[in-house]
C-alpha cells in the first residue's frame, strides 16, 4: 500500500486567521520503489527531506536507488561556538493554552493523510544538527512539544508527525511511514544519529520502528510510553466509552483531562521561580482560570469515534511493540511520571530498563501523563543532562556540549543549588596583573585558554557558587574536571530522578582524563581543575584547608603546551557551614557500613581502570556532617600566570616542577589570606546578610571585607 509523507512548515497566519490557509505545491521525488511516494512541500525548510534545489540530499541514480550527492566539505563547528552562553531557549513562553489554540486550527479536516511538519517556533538549527522526529500521543496533533520547540529547534532539525482526526491509518502503516523517513535520513547521513521522541502512543511507535531497524543509529526519548496499556488502571472504563451517548460526548474531554495530566503542573509553566509565594499563587490562579474553558476543545481534538479508534489502535500498538522488544538495539531514555493516572508509567519504566540493553530512566514524581505539556524541565535539558545529545556514534563532552541557556541558569542556581547559594553568600575576589586584589572577577582573564587551579572544599560545596559567579558576572562557562564516578558510577541517583549528577553535565563538567583536559585547553576554554580531587573534597577530621596534591606536575606541562594562563585560587568557608563528625576512619569502624564502603570501592575498579594517576587511589564515601548557622564562602583568585611562549616547560621537568610548586604555594597563600580577612567581614553571618539584603540589595550584592 502506497503511503505519502507530507511535510510543511506551519505559517504564522495559520493560527491567527482560519480563513487563510498555507499554500504549497507538492513535488514527487523520484524513487525506484513504486510503493514509496515521498512529497516535499515548497517552503518546507525544516522537513525530513529538504527541497532538492536547496539541500540536494538525494539524486536519482537511474537504477532505482537513492545515491547521496557528494557535497563540498565544510569545517565542523562545535555547538558552543554557534550558541552563546545563557542563550534564550524560550522555555516558559508557551503553555498548554497555546497547544489547545494551535490544535483547534490544525484539526480542521483537509482529507489528507498523516504528514510531517516543522513548527515555525523551531527556527533555523545550527549546522550539522541531527534529525528529531516527534511522534504524538492519542491526540495525533503533533504539537505536543510546543513548550520545547524553540530550544529543540536550535540543535535539532525538528519534524512532528500530524495524524488528522478522521484518519484511520493502521498501526503498521504508521510504522512504515516513520520507517521511510528514518531510512531516507540514514541514507543521506549514515554516521549521524536520528532522534525519535515518542509521547505515550508515540512511544510504542518509536520502539516498533527501532525493532525493525536495529542497524540504524537511533536515540529514543520516550515520555510515559504506552507499552503498559494492557495494565492500565482504566481498562474497565474503555468499553463504556463505546456505549457513551453521543449527546454527552462533550464531557469526555473533561474526564480525560483529570486522567491524563496534572492541571496545576500545566498552569505552572512560565511562572518565574524567583517570585514571592503570593505572586506565584496569583499567577497560578490566573493561568488555571484561562486554561479550564479551553478544555472543551478536546471534544474536537479527540471526538468519541476517534477516541474509540485510538484506544483500539493503542491496544494493537502495545501488543505489537512488546512482542519485539528483544530486537531493539537503539539508545533509549524513558521519562516516567509518578502521578500518571492513565498508565502505570513508573513500573513500566523499570520494566523497560530491565528488558532493554541500552536504556536509562528519569522519573518525575509530581507530573501526570502529559509530561511534555507540564511544568518540569526543558526536554533539551534532560537530553543534555543524560548525555544523549551527540552528532556521531559516541557522545563527546567537548564537541557535543550545548552551553546552558538562561532558563537552565535560573533553574539550576535558584531551585537546585538555591539553598547553598543563599546560605553561603559567596564573596569573590581576584588579583589584577599589578598584584592589586579587587572584589569580583575582573582579575581573571576573559580570553582562554585559562586553567583555574585551586582547593576543593568538603564535598565540593564551593562548586555551584563558583560556576554561577562566572556565568553571572562574565558570561563565561567554566568546564570543571570532575571525578568519573559522576559520569559512569553509582553516584547516579538511585531513584532515577533528574538530580545533581545530571546537572553537573548540563553545566559543562568533564571526566578527569588527560584526553578531555587536552581537548578543553585546545578549544581555549576556561577549565576548572582540583589537583587534590576527591582526597581533598572527602578529607578527614583536622585536615580542612590542607592540600593533597599529587607529585606529578602534568597539568603545568599541559597548560604550557597550549600557552594557557594558570590562575591559582583558594576558597574557605566549609567550617562556617558544617562540622565534620564522621570521616572515612570513623565509618570503617562501623561493621555494616564499612562493608558497604568496601563493596562500593570494589565496584569502582572498572572506573579506576579507565583513568590514570591518583584518581584510582581515592576512597569515595559520604562524610557525616552536622550543619551550623551558616557563615560565608570566600574565594580569592590569585595573580594570573601566563605560559604563552613557555613551551620549554613541556620538556624541562625541573622547571615544570618548580612552577607546579609555585602554583601550589600561591593557592595556600590565598587560603591563608581569606582565613585572616574574613574576620573583618561585618556580614559574615547569614543573619546580617539577610537583613542587609532585605533593606538594601539582593543577596548577591552584599559587600564583604575590604581587600
Image (cartoon, helix red, strand yellow):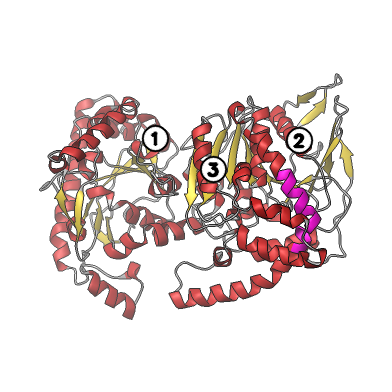
Mark closer to the chain start, 2 or 3: 2
Classify mark 2: helix, strand or loop. Answer: helix
The answer to which of 264 and 80 lies nearer the viewer is: 264
Q: Given contact means CB atoms under 8 Å apart, are the residues at marks 1 and 2 in contact? A: no
Q: Going 78% across and 39% down the picture, which residue do you hit?
A: 54
Q: Which of the marked residues, 1 or 2, is nearer the chain's N terminus?
A: 2
Q: Nearer the viewer, residue 698 or 601?
A: 601
Q: Which residue is mark 2?
A: 172
Is residue 95 in sight in this rendering? Answer: no
Query: Can residue 417 be seen?
Result: yes
Residue marked by disc 3? 348
Label 1, label 2: how far apart the Cα atoms are: 38 Å
**What range is drawn magenta here?**
299-314
Q: Which mark is residue 292?
A: none
In this rendering, position of residue 198 left or right of residue 560 = right
**Where in the figure is residue 239, as x and y percent of width and height?**
72, 52
SS state under label 1 = helix
> Which residue is disc 1 drawn over?
488
Q: Earlier in the sequence, mark 3 or mark 1?
A: 3
Q: Quadrant of residue 563?
A: top left
In this view, which residue lies farthest toward the left?
A: 542
Of labels 2 and 3, the one closer to you: 3
> Could you tell me which residue is drawn at 26 percent across and 32 percent down?
599
> Residue shown at 54%/43% (left/top)?
348
Task: Reply above or below: 697 against 562.
Answer: below
Mark nearer the viewer, 3 or 1: 3
Q: Position of residue 142 (x, y in %)?
A: 72, 51
315 with respect to 540 (left or right): right
* x, y percent for residue 389: 54, 40
Residue 18: where, in percent of width, then height? 84, 65
Q: Is residue 303 magenta?
A: yes
Amino acid at each position: 500500500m502506497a503511503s505519502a509523507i507530507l511535510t510543511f512548515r506551519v505559517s504564522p497566519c495559520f493560527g491567527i486567521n482560519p480563513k487563510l490557509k498555507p499554500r504549497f505545491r507538492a513535488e514527487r521525488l523520484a524513487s525506484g520503489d513504486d510503493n514509496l511516494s515521498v512529497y516535499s512541500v515548497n517552503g518546507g525548510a525544516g522537513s525530513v527531506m529538504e527541497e532538492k534545489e536547496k539541500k540536494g540530499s538525494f539524486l536519482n541514480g537511474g537504477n532505482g536507488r537513492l545515491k547521496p550527492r557528494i557535497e563540498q566539505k565544510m569545517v565542523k563547528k562545535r555547538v558552543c561556538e554557534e550558541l552563546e552562553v545563557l542563550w534564550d531557549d524560550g522555555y516558559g513562553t508557551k503553555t498548554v493554552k497555546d497547544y489547545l489554540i494551535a490544535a483547534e486550527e490544525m484539526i480542521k479536516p483537509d482529507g489528507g493523510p498523516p504528514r510531517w511538519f516543522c513548527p515555525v517556533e523551531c527556527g533555523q538549527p545550527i549546522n550539522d544538527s541531527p534529525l528529531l522526529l516527534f511522534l504524538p500521543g492519542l491526540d495525533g496533533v503533533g504539537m505536543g512539544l510546543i513548550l520545547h520547540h524553540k530550544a529543540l529547534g536550535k540543535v535539532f532539525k525538528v519534524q512532528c508527525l500530524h495524524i488528522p482526526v478522521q484518519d484511520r491509518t493502521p498501526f503498521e502503516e504508521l510504522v512504515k511511514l516513520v520507517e521511510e523517513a528514518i531510512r531516507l535520513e540514514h541514507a543521506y547521513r549514515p554516521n549521524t544519529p536520528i532522534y525519535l521522541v515518542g509521547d505515550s502512543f508515540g512511544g510504542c511507535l518509536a520502539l516498533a520502528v527501532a525493532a525493525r531497524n536495529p542497524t540504524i543509529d537511533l536515540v529514543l526519548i520516550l515520555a510515559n510510553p504506552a507499552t503498559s496499556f494492557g495494565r492500565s488502571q482504566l481498562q474497565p472504563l474503555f468499553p463504556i466509552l463505546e456505549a457513551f451517548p453521543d449527546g454527552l460526548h462533550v464531557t469526555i474531554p473533561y474526564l480525560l483531562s483529570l486522567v491524563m495530566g496534572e492541571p496545576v503542573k500545566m498552569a505552572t509553566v512560565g511562572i518565574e521561580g524567583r517570585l514571592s509565594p503570593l505572586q506565584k499563587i496569583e499567577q497560578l490562579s490566573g493561568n488555571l482560570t484561562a486554561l479550564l474553558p479551553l478544555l472543551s476543545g478536546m471534544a474536537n481534538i479527540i471526538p468519541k469515534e476517534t477516541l474509540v479508534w485510538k484506544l483500539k489502535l493503542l491496544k494493537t500498538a502495545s501488543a505489537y511493540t512488546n512482542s519485539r522488544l528483544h530486537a531493539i538495539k537503539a539508545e533509549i531514555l524513558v521519562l516516567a511520571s509518578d502521578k500518571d493516572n492513565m498508565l502505570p508509567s513508573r513500573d513500566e519504566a523499570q520494566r523497560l530498563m530491565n528488558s532493554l540493553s541500552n536504556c536509562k530512566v528519569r522519573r518525575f514524581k509530581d507530573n501526570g501523563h502529559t509530561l511534555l505539556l507540564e511544568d518540569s524541565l526543558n526536554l533539551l535539558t534532560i537530553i543534555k543532562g543524560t548525555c544523549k545529545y551527540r552528532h556521531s556514534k559516541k557522545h563527546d563532552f567537548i564537541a557535543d556540549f550545548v552551553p546552558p541557556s538562561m532558563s537552565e541558569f535560573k533553574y539550576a542556581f535558584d531551585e537546585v543549588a538555591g539553598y547553598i547559594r543563599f546560605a553561603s553568600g559567596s564573596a569573590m575576589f581576584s588579583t589584577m596583573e599589578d598584584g592589586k586584589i579587587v572584589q569580583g572577577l575582573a582579575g581573571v582573564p576573559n580570553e582562554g585558554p585559562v586553567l583555574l587551579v585551586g582547593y576543593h572544599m568538603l564535598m565540593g560545596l564551593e562548586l555551584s557558587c563558583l560556576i554561577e559567579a562566572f556565568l553571572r558576572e562574565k558570561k563565561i562557562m567554566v568546564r570543571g574536571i570532575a571525578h568519573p564516578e559522576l559520569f559512569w558510577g553509582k553516584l547516579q541517583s538511585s531513584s532515577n530522578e533528574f538530580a545533581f549528577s545530571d546537572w553537573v553535565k548540563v553545566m559543562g563538567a568533564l571526566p578527569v582524563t588527560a584526553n578531555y583536559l587536552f581537548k578543553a585547553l585546545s578549544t581555549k576554554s576556561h577549565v576548572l581543575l582540583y589537583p587534590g580531587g576527591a582526597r581533598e573534597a572527602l578529607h578527614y577530621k583536622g585536615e580542612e584547608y590542607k592540600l593533597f596534591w599529587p607529585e606529578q606536575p602534568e597539568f603545568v606541562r599541559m597548560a604550557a603546551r597550549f600557552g594557557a594562563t594558570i590562575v591559582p585560587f583558594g576558597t574557605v568557608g566549609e567550617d562556617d557551614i558544617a562540622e565534620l563528625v564522621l570521616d572515612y576512619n570513623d565509618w570503617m569502624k562501623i561493621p555494616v557500613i564499612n562493608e558497604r564502603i568496601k563493596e562500593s570501592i570494589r565496584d569502582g575498579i572498572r572506573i579506576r581502570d579507565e583513568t590514570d594517576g591518583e584518581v584510582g587511589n581515592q576512597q569515595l564515601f559520604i562524610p557525616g556532617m552536622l550543619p551550623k548557622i551558616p557563615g560565608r564562602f570566600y574565594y580569592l583568585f590569585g595573580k594570573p600566570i601566563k605560559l604563552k611562549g613557555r613551551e620549554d616547560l613541556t620538556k624541562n621537568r625541573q622547571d615544570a616542577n618548580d612552577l607546579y610548586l609555585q602554583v601550589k604555594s600561591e593557592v595556600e597563600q590565598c587560603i591563608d589570606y581569606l582565613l585572616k580577612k574574613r574576620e573583618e567581614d561585618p556580614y559574615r553571618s547569614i543573619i546580617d546578610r539577610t537583613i542587609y539584603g532585605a533593606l538594601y540589595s539582593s543577596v548577591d550584592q552584599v559587600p564583604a571585607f575590604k581587600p
